[in-house]
Image (cartoon, rainbow, N blue to C red):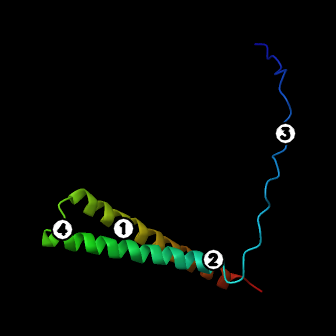
Amino acid sequence: MAVESLGGLLPLAPLPQGDKPTAVAPGGGFGRVLQGVLGESAQATAAADGAVQALATGQAQDLHTVSLAVARADLSFRLVLDLRNRMAEAYQEVMRMQV
């Protein structure tokens, strides 16, 4: 079986150099992102609690909206839980390092 060459291929062009990332402002970074995630999780939990309470009192007629709010709160909680687990693992890894 003969293998033919792949003629006509052009060399890869370099990627365009767009805006370069700027430095993170003091007080920003991981702490701010973590606060944002925790805030969103608290808001999702409060919304789910409100939706469940409205359903229990007969104010909410749409079960789909309530289940969606509960699913969002559950997903948000799982994200926070996974972040906590990963931060604990990272801390343990740092503590195992020999200096």
Which image quadrant: the C terminus?
Answer: bottom right
- Residue at x-position 45% and y-position 73%: 40
Q: Given contact means CB atoms under 8 Å apart, are the residues at marks 2 and 3 in contact?
A: no
Look at the numbered disc 1 and give the secondary structure of its residue: helix
Q: Amino acid at mark 3?
A: Ala
Relative to 12, 90 lies left or right: left
Q: Give the distance between the C-alpha atoms of the residues marked 2 and 4, in whole angstroms.
A: 37 Å
Marks 4 and 3, the one that precedes in the sequence: 3
Marks 1 and 4, the one that precedes in the sequence: 4
User: Picture quarter containing residue 54?
Assistant: bottom left
Look at the numbered disc 2 and give the secondary structure of its residue: helix
Residue position marked by numbered label 3 in the rendering? 13
Look at the numbered disc 4 and give the secondary structure of its residue: helix
Q: Position of residue 60 (x, y in %)?
A: 19, 65
Residue position marked by numbered label 4 in the rendering? 55
Mark 1 crowd level (few <14, some 14–19, many ≥20, 10 Å Cα): some
Q: Nearer the viewer, mark 2 or mark 4?
A: 4
Residue position marked by numbered label 2 in the rendering? 30
Q: Give the distance between the C-alpha atoms of the residues marked 2 and 1, in whole angstroms.
A: 23 Å
Q: Give the distance between the C-alpha atoms of the residues marked 2 and 3, in whole angstroms.
A: 35 Å
Q: Position of residue 6 (x, y in %)?
A: 81, 22
Q: Nearer the viewer, mark 1 or mark 3?
A: 3
